[in-house]
Image (spheres, rainbow, N blue to C red):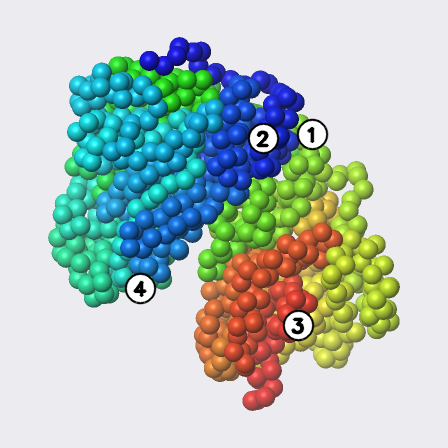
């Protein structure tokens, strides 16, 4: 029997210098015990928060073993962490966090003949799938976080995903494990070869009856330890690999895994089936399983938008089928459609259409965190599972229980496996709300057990459900879990508080440390009730921002993809802001250097505003922080130079020619860049010798008297068009007047959107500029304002009303903003643009993607015969960001992600498009290519063919 011991219940309140010294002398990987590293790892994607002592990024298995030996010697607990997307709290801990994503990311071997791969624990699932794809293979389990979750984390949680009805859970797809126990002992686990540490075989042999009768029979039983896999009659013999999967880091750390690969269908089709409600969809799901689908996923109308393009119904099943040919996959889907008793149905074979539908499902973990009225919803009862045949009845009872407790939730998930995900509008900010959270959890556990289910069907028990395991398994089997844990980990150092001797489900809630009253801030935060803490806690940790390859038109998060550092992801920055408000780890509030340094590489691209499933807006949070951080203090030189750019350009305009000449003198240019905080690698842009507005007034002979508001166009003279690229304004005037028969009005003097002031956090100045603009800009009621520069349009659309929420003119101006293409589509719908019939490459401005949308631009390019897609992501210049000293490498790395390769690969004669001044400047300075605004391209063609 195991040696009797006192379970590990905590860690020293401060890091021991002796422990740090011993650790650093024993391992090669970098360790960090600073406030920023600790703050970044206080939370995962759950409701829970624990403050670790520090973080280690081990370089190899030897580092892991050495670290676990030192931790045991000093009594420091350990939590192994992959992508940090666990929803039950098991990726948080109070000791040493092992970050396995930094170095342990090698696919050691991939054997197509044997259909196996050998991987390190930090390998991202999508990387393994990409490596297997050329061989027609894939790894079957595919959680919605597949672009950032790691194989080690999947093994720890026994992750599943949408395709488990075809290929099972992670435990079904792991063949062998190399693991290290607390203290440093290495073990190799394989099916039929042993059962684990000494004493495990005897423990199993003495409890055969209990293990044979104590587990429910269902496909998604993830809760507890899978000790029944160690029974002698288990197919193939006792399976310590399966018993280890789902142990949530409480037994040891995986250093290497041999996994099974499955044949990926050459073609897929998607049958989308509409039902009257979610219970009807759930009742129908088991009847589709005999048709051997790849997935049977379900969701209800309260999770999707009206424009989702789904068949009629209030709930839907997504049933994916496969085949060797598209015709075979479609025929399979048609059989499913005929067999389904659905209100309506459709078959989608177009890969793009399938991706769009699956994106609704994959983003659900984030989108479900907001109820239709905007109120918050949280995990906590996230992923229970019942036998598929019981799912409809369970959902009806579950909905009734929600109503009884006055709660709301949006169930969705793996209906074919009886597994339901749901976020519920728990009040986790007050004592009464937390008490209701506990009562509901206890009663729902009873409901799940009554339906023969498992408390966890995918994400593990963690802190959210481990306390309730006796309700599912009984006290005797749960006690056996404790004895099994003690044989593996007699010192109790592996992820204590999880599964065995767990913390209470209402302890360590991450909201408890936040301010009880709203923080005094500058922006209005209209979606969060004016509460900055509410805005920050939008981040639920699903880490879509940690995706390492930008997909399609997506933008978020360019700085993470450039650096690979958690601190430079949207989630990482949100975590640091959370800890800044908490004041426990980061103690100097708005003056925090940790938050400042993390935000320094935020490009303010606003990509997260649209790409984050919960709409985190880090650009706004950055501006807010910089405002408070530098209030009453000396700012960086770039804030004075580029942050106040409109002022300097207005002053410089009369002297453009001599200033341009001086900027070409290298010593003077170098001095100017050093004084202005500009990166030495950058070239100072050329000033226009005639501004746009001066040209327009000269063209109209000093002014035009317009009697009818129906015959004018209000064209915004942004700073970049006015002083740096007036040719864009001149082209736009020509096109707008040609297309509409209207006259473009000369712009009022001295108006500015305030963009550069906002991006550098000079919010008092930004408000002054914006109020002056509202005073001087006399738009006709209901008349649109055409804005050529996407960043300025986005500022007017969002920042203006959020900084001046009490001025009705701000909201009115924001609603009037149109892009060039939007205006043409709305006010010249019958105008035929010139046909160019050639390919195009270039950049969709990140602010356009995030705030304005580019659908009108796409349609206009299509009408012109400009084929091909513009690059997504971010060009990397992003206004002042790419010009600031210290940002050159990240700026260039962002451009190299999509934009520069696309330009290099473009065929001769390809049109190079970029509506944003930053994007055009980046292409000019990094590729030596001149890109043009779409207005310039059209105007040139109009001049050529009147």
Left or right of 485? Residue 321 is left
How crowded is the residue under tag 4: few (<14 C-alpha within 10 Å), some, or many (20+)? few
Q: Which residue is mark 4?
A: 350
Please name which of the two marks, 3 or 2, marks the residue nearer to the observer.
2
Residue furthest toward the bottom? 945
Real-space Cα separation, disc 3 to disc 4, in angstroms = 38 Å
Left or right of 357? Residue 585 is right
Q: Which residue is mark 2?
A: 26
Depth order, front residue of 613/243:
243
Q: Is residue 591 above or below residue 311?
A: above
**Tag 4's secondary structure?**
loop
Q: Which residue is mark 3?
A: 928
State which tag comes first along the sequence, 4 or 1.
Answer: 4
Q: Position of residue 52 (x, y in %)?
A: 55, 27
Real-space Cα separation, disc 1 to disc 3, in angstroms = 45 Å
Q: Is residue 897 above or below residue 485?
A: below
Depth order, front residue of 528/108:
108
């Amino acid at each position: 029997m195991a040696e009797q011991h006192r379970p590990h219940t905590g860690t020293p309140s401060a890091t021991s210098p002796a422990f740090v010294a011993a650790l650093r002398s024993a391992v090669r990987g970098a360790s960090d015990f600073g406030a920023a590293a600790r703050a970044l790892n206080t939370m995962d994607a759950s409701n829970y928060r624990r403050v670790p002592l520090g973080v280690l990024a081990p370089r190899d298995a030897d580092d892991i073993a050495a670290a676990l030996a030192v931790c045991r010697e000093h009594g420091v607990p350990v939590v192994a962490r992959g992508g940090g997307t666990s929803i039950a709290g098991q990726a948080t801990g109070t000791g040493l966090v092992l970050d396995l994503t930094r170095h342990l990311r090698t696919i050691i071997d991939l054997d197509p003949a044997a259909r196996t791969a050998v991987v390190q624990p930090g390998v991202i699932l999508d990387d393994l799938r990409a490596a297997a794809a050329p061989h027609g293979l894939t790894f079957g389990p595919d959680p919605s976080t597949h672009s950032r979750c790691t194989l080690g984390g999947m093994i720890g949680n026994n992750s599943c995903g949408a395709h488990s009805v075809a290929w099972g859970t992670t435990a079904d797809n792991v063949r062998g494990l190399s693991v290290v126990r607390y203290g440093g002992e290495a073990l190799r686990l394989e099916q039929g070869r042993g059962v684990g540490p000494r004493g495990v075989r005897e423990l199993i042999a003495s409890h055969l009856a209990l293990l044979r009768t104590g587990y429910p029979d269902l496909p998604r039983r993830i809760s507890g330890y899978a000790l029944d896999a160690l029974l002698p009659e288990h197919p193939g013999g006792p399976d310590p690999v399966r018993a280890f999967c789902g142990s949530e880091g409480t037994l040891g750390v995986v250093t290497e895994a041999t996994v099974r690969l499955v044949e990926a269908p050459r073609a897929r089709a998607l049958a989308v089936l509409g039902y009257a409600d979610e219970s009807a969809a759930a009742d129908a799901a088991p009847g589709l399983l005999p048709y051997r689908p790849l997935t049977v996923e379900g969701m209800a109308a309260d999770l999707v938008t009206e424009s989702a393009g789904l068949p009629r119904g209030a709930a839907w099943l997504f049933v994916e089928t496969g085949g060797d040919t598209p015709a075979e996959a479609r025929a399979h889907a048609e059989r499913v459609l005929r067999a389904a008793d659905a209100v309506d149905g459709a078959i989608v074979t177009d890969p793009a259409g399938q991706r769009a539908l699956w994106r609704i499902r994959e983003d659900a973990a984030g989108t479900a965190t907001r109820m239709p009225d905007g109120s918050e919803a949280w995990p906590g009862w996230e992923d229970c599972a019942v036998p598929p045949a019981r799912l409809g009845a369970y959902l009806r009872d579950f909905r009734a229980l929600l109503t009884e407790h006055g709660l709301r939730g949006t169930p969705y998930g793996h209906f074919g496996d009886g597994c339901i995900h749901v976020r519920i509008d728990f009040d986790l900010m007050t004592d009464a709300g937390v008490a209701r959270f506990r009562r509901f959890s206890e009663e729902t556990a009873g409901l799940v057990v009554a339906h023969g289910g498992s408390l966890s069907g995918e994400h593990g028990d963690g802190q959210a459900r481990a306390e309730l395991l006796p309700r599912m398994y009984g006290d005797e089997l749960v006690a056996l879990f404790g004895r099994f844990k003690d044989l593996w980990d007699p010192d109790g150092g592996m992820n204590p508080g999880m599964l065995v001797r767990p913390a209470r489900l209402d302890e360590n809630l991450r909201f408890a440390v936040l301010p009880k009253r709203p923080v005094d801030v500058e922006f209005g935060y209209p979606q969060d009730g004016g509460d900055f803490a509410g805005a920050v806690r939008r981040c639920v940790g699903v880490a879509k921002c940690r995706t390492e390859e930008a997909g399609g038109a997506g933008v978020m998060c360019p700085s993470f993809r450039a650096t690979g550092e958690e601190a430079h992801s949207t989630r990482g920055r949100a975590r640091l802001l959370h800890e800044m408000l908490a004041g426990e780890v980061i103690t100097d509030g708005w003056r925090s250097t940790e938050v400042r340094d993390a935000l320094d590489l935020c490009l303010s691209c606003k990509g997260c505003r649209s790409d984050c499933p919960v709409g985190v807006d880090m650009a706004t949070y950055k501006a807010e922080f910089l405002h408070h951080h530098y209030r009453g203090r000396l700012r960086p030189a770039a804030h004075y130079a580029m942050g106040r750019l409109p002022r300097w350009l207005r002053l410089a305009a009369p002297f453009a020619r001599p200033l341009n000449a001086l900027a070409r003198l290298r010593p003077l240019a170098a001095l100017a860049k050093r004084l202005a905080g500009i990166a030495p690698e950058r070239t100072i842009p050329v000033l226009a010798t005639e501004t746009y507005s001066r040209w327009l007034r000269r063209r109209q002979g000093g002014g035009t008297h317009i009697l009818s508001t129906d015959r004018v166009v209000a064209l915004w003279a942004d700073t970049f068009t006015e002083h740096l690229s007036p040719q864009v304004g001149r082209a736009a005037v020509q096109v707008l007047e040609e297309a509409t028969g209207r006259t473009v009005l000369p712009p009022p003097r001295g108006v500015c959107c305030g963009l550069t002031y906002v991006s550098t956090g000079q919010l008092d100045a930004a408000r002054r500029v914006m109020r002056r603009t509202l005073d001087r800009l006399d738009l006709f009621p209901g008349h649109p304002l055409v804005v050529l520069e996407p960043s300025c349009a986005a500022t007017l659309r969002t920042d203006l009303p959020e900084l001046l929420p009490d001025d009705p003119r701000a909201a009115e101006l924001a609603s009037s903003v149109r892009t060039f293409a939007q205006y043409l589509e709305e006010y010249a719908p019958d105008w035929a643009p010139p046909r160019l019939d050639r390919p195009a490459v270039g950049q969709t401005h990140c602010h356009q993607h995030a705030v304005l949308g580019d659908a009108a631009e796409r349609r206009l390019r299509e009408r012109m015969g400009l084929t091909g897609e513009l690059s997504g992501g971010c060009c990397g210049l992003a206004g002042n960001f790419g010009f600031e000293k210290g940002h050159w490498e990240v700026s260039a790395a962002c451009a190299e992600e999509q934009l520069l390769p696309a330009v290099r690969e473009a065929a001769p004669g390809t049109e190079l498009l970029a509506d944003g001044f930053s994007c055009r400047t980046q292409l000019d300075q990094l590729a030596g290519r001149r890109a043009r605004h779409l207005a310039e391209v059209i105007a040139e063609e109009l001049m050529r063919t009147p």
